[in-house]
Amino acid sequence: MTDLVLESFVWLIRVELMMWIGGLRSIHRYVRAYKTRLSVDGLRRDSDKLSRAMDLACAFYPRRTLCLQRSAATLLLLRHHGWNAQLIIGAQTVPFKSHAWVEVNGGVVSDKPYMRQMYQVVELL
């Protein structure tokens, strides 16, 4: 599990650097272009285990991670390990709020399972 937490930590750093250097547009382009990797040995790590590793990495991350950074990093981690994950960006109008989360096979893996009931989906990546 330690190796997955460290890998998650690296994804958080990469996404933060992208946000800092190129803003939202660079993250959007990178996430859209990053394709699901095929597993060499045919085995995939459990998506829940990968999500838990990201939770731990966020807990130890020296800066506060916002939902977009966390979701983008989780998506990249999952795709790197062979999961066809989607980054979902949603919004609600009153009061206005936006949020990002990750889904695999239609189920939320990086947040509460009822996110689609709370937010109108704005974009799927």
Image (cartoon, helix red, strand yellow):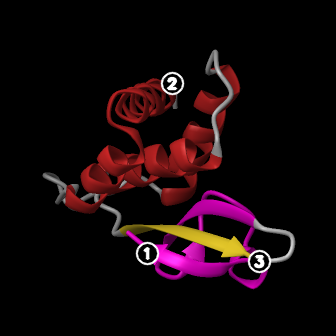
Q: Which mark is residue 79?
A: none
Q: Amino acid at mark 3?
A: Thr
Q: Earlier in the sequence, mark 2 or mark 3?
A: 2
Q: Do residues under tags 1 and 3 come within 8 Å of each other at their CB atoms?
A: no
- For disc 3, the marked residue is 93
71 vs 57, nearest the viewer: 71
Mark 1 lies on a secondary structure that is strand
Q: Quadrant of residue 92?
A: bottom right
105 vs 102, nearest the viewer: 102
Above or below 67: residue 15: above
The stretch in magenta equals 97-125
- Image location (x, y in percent) of residue 4: 45, 33
45 vs 74, nearest the viewer: 74
Asked if residue 110 is among those painted magenta in the image, a careful observer would answer yes
- For disc 2, the marked residue is 2
Q: CA distance from mark 1 to mark 3?
A: 18 Å
Q: Check disc 3: other Cα within 10 Å, few if <14, some if 14-19, many if 20+.
A: few
Q: Check disc 1: other Cα within 10 Å, few if <14, some if 14-19, many if 20+.
A: some
Q: Amino acid at mark 2?
A: Thr
Quadrant, the C terminus: bottom left
Mark 2 lies on a secondary structure that is helix
Residue at 42% of width from left, 35% of height from top? Answer: 19
Residue at 64% of width from left, 20% of height from top? Answer: 63
Residue at 61% of width from left, 21% of height from top? Answer: 61
